[in-house]
Amino acid sequence: MWDGSNLELNDGDEIEISRGIIAKKGYDYDIRASLILNLSTLIIFRSSVEGAWGSSQPRDFDPPISGYVENIEVSPRKILFDIVEKESSFRYR
């Protein structure tokens, strides 16, 4: 998930998420990204709401979560998408 509308992604773009909040949900994960590098376009996107999410604060991911974007859903307040990891079959949303 991405807060706001300033993220430019297309299905199939390769991205790295290097900062955000992650929560395990069964076999899947929910990620609220705050720093994304779109490797397909070489553009870095930073969330404007960093640090404004209440008790859970964003943290750096080392190594970054990387994969390919699928199933983009855009609304006025957020962008939802799936990321399919390069080396695994886990899906993040």
Image: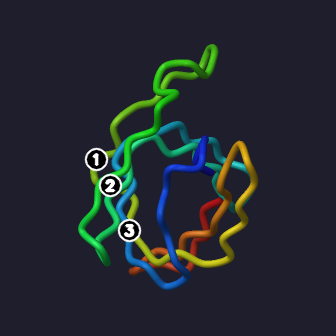
Question: Type of residue at label 2?
Answer: Pro
Q: At x 53% / y 37%, what residue is drawn?
A: 21
Question: Type of residue at label 3?
Answer: Ile
Mark 3, Cα crowd under 10 Å, few <14 / some 14-19 / many 20+, is: many
Whole-number angstrom distance, CA of label 2 to CA of label 3: 9 Å
Q: Are marks 2 and 1 in contact (CB under 8 Å)?
A: yes
- Dividing the picture into quarters, in which one does residue 59 lie? top left
Q: Is residue 88 above or below residue 79?
A: below
Q: Position of residue 85 (x, y in %)?
A: 46, 74
- Dividing the picture into quarters, in which one does residue 23 lie? top right
Mark 2, Cα crowd under 10 Å, few <14 / some 14-19 / many 20+, is: some
Front position in the image: 4 or 67: 4
Give the residue number, with chain letter if any, for mark 1.
62
Q: At x 34% / y 66%, what residue is drawn?
A: 38
Q: Are marks 2 and 3 in contact (CB under 8 Å)?
A: no
Q: Is residue 92 above or below residue 52?
A: below
Q: Residue furthest toward the top?
A: 55
Give the residue number, with chain letter if any, for mark 3.
15
Screen quadrant of the C terminus: bottom right
Mark in front: 1 vs 3:
3
Task: Check the image and tell me how it is coloured.
Answer: rainbow
